[in-house]
Image (cartoon, rainbow, N blue to C red):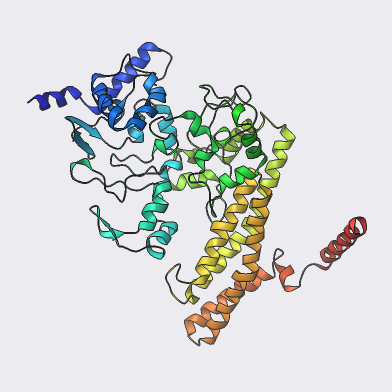
């Protein structure tokens, strides 16, 4: 009976946090439903603290450093659950949930949550049905990782790799416990039991939830690094990164108001350019609102096209508006001509990649599919060569141009792209044509003829004809003359 009364006193999960918002509005009438704190730590949270400060001293200390602590927001205000919640469990007489989801955070941080939920970050968990996840689940993995939530097994490669950045679909076991294949997980697109997508603690690490830590470029580096999206390495090579690491102590990262040009000016971080406030823009938790190219796909596209495919509100925000948003950040350190000329350079690299490699490469690969040894993707060498051309080399070049890292644009980008295009991809396609014709099978002969026709079209195009000795004579003469002039000027 006592337990029933105790649970009834808890009220609904939403009513409790509504009280927080009401307190906030009462204390600060101009705030728009945003919490600024409670008068004191709740009695229920004090019960939690009395135990956790003994058993989980680090968590207790981290919370003690947080703004939550200073606002009297503690354990129960975040972890409270209704008995009807799918992930609810009873813990020392209280109904709680292990997971704190964006929906939970949104009861106090409504604006930030709405922006985040409308971003590509929150949808990262949708990789679960993608080509990348097939690599981890099938090609790299097997079904030997059996857990209560996955009776048919799962791939440990996906669980420990892909899902830890992109997020897993959390599966709840009896009693509100979480399946070990899906938890722990702080992937930014985590699919939560309450239907929300995302994990705020992907950037605001528990239990400090430090804004300074979220502003630091190393935070983004948990996921944005490696052969296919090396933004962290790119940033470190760029002048922006060089300035940051030389002046980190001058960055004022802990400032409540962190406006570029007012509160810091030594360097920009990832957050500066993609999220943080300027004198004219508020903070945004939708990292796509300042990006004018989506360089993730085979061919670069405008971000509003990608948002439309995913049903995101950004579908209504054209790339020109997003570019203007980013330029409003740039203008704090650079003059207008510099900014405009940078974007001319960047657009030129994207156009080069799209027209010379991405569009013809995708068309050639599609025509090569009937001629593969196996119909299964990633069971043939051609699959890997083409995948790495766009997914690795092509992405590196595009991302690096966007962030001004010349070595990653060239040597880790366009050079490797061109080398593998001419030395691996095209010869492999030519070999597939020969073997298809030699097979004598009508369907393969037809497929080989179609592939060869496209291959010849590509080879004789303006971008590639040099490779078969058909460079325009006037261009060849001009290049020879310029080379001779260079040797005459600088040769020893």
Task: Tell me: residue 334, above or below residue 167.
Answer: above
Q: Is residue 316 left or right of residue 57?
A: right
Q: Looking at this view, is 3 or 310 the one in front?
A: 3
Q: In percent of the image, x 57 and y 53: which residue is there?
A: 395
Q: Quadrant of residue 330?
A: top right
Q: Quadrant of the N terminus?
A: top left
Task: Tell me: residue 421, above or below residue 260.
Answer: below
Q: Is residue 412 left or right of residue 372?
A: right
Outermost residue toward the front?
54
Q: Quadrant of residue 435?
A: bottom right
Task: Tell me: residue 410, above or below residue 210.
Answer: below
Percent position of residue 54, x then y: 28, 29
Q: In percent of the image, x 50 and y 22: which residue is there?
A: 256
Percent position of residue 476, x then y: 83, 66
Q: Can residue 284 be seen in the rendering of this structure?
A: no
Percent position of residue 378, x then y: 46, 67
Q: Quadrant of residue 260?
A: top right
Q: In percent of the image, x 38 and y 39: which residue is there?
A: 199
Q: Is residue 265 left or right of residue 363?
A: right
Q: Can residue 446 be seen in the rendering of this structure?
A: yes
Q: Quadrant of the C terminus?
A: bottom right
Q: Looking at this view, is 176 or 369 the one in front?
A: 176
Percent position of residue 436, x then y: 53, 82
Task: Tell me: residue 176, above or below residue 126.
Answer: above
């Amino acid at each position: 009976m006592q337990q029933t009364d105790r649970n009834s006193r808890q009220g609904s999960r939403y009513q409790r946090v509504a009280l927080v918002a009401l307190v906030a509005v009462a204390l600060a009438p101009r705030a728009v439903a945003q919490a600024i704190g409670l008068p004191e730590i709740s009695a229920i949270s004090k019960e939690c603290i009395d135990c956790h400060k003994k058993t989980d001293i680090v968590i207790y200390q981290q919370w003690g450093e947080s703004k939550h602590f200073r606002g009297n927001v503690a354990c129960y205000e975040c972890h409270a659950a209704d008995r009807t919640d799918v992930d609810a469990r009873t813990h020392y007489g209280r109904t709680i949930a292990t997971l704190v989801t964006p929906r939970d955070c949104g009861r106090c941080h409504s604006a930030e949550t709405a922006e985040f939920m409308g971003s590509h970050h929150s949808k990262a968990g949708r990789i679960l049905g993608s080509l990348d996840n097939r690599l981890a689940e099938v090609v790299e993995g097997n079904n030997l990782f059996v857990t209560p939530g996955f009776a048919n097994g799962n791939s440990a490669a996906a669980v420990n790799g892909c899902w830890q950045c992109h997020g897993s679909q959390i599966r709840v076991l009896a009693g509100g416990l979480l399946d070990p294949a899906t938890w722990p997980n702080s992937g930014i697109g985590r699919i939560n039991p309450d239907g929300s997508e995302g994990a705020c603690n992907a950037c605001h690490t528990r239990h400090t939830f430090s804004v300074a830590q979220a502003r630091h470029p190393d935070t983004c580096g948990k996921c944005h690094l490696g052969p296919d999206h090396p933004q962290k390495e790119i940033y470190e090579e760029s002048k922006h990164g060089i300035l940051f690491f030389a002046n980190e102590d001058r960055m004022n990262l802990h400032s409540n108001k962190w406006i570029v040009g007012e509160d810091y000016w030594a360097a920009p971080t990832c957050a500066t350019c993609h999220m943080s406030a300027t004198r004219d823009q508020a903070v945004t938790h939708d990292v796509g609102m300042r990006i004018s190219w989506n360089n993730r796909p085979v061919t670069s596209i405008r971000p509003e096209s990608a948002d439309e495919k995913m049903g995101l509100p950004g579908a209504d925000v054209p790339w020109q508006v997003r570019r203007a948003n980013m330029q409003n950040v740039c203008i704090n350190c650079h003059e207008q001509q510099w900014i405009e000329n940078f974007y001319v350079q960047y657009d030129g690299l994207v156009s080069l990649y799209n027209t010379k490699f991405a569009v013809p490469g995708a068309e050639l690969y599609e025509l090569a599919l009937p001629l593969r040894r196996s119909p299964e993707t990633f069971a043939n060498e051609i699959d890997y060569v083409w995948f790495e051309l766009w997914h690795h080399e092509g992405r590196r070049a595009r991302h690096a141009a966007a962030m001004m890292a010349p070595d990653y644009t060239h040597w880790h980008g366009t050079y490797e792209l061109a080398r593998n295009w001419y030395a691996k991809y095209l010869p492999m396609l030519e070999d597939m044509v020969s073997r298809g014709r030699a097979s004598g099978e009508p369907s393969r002969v037809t497929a080989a003829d179609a592939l060869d026709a496209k291959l010849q079209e590509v080879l004789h195009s303006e971008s590639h004809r040099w490779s078969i000795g058909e460079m325009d004579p006037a261009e060849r003469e001009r290049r020879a003359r310029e080379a001779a002039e260079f040797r005459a000027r600088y040769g020893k």
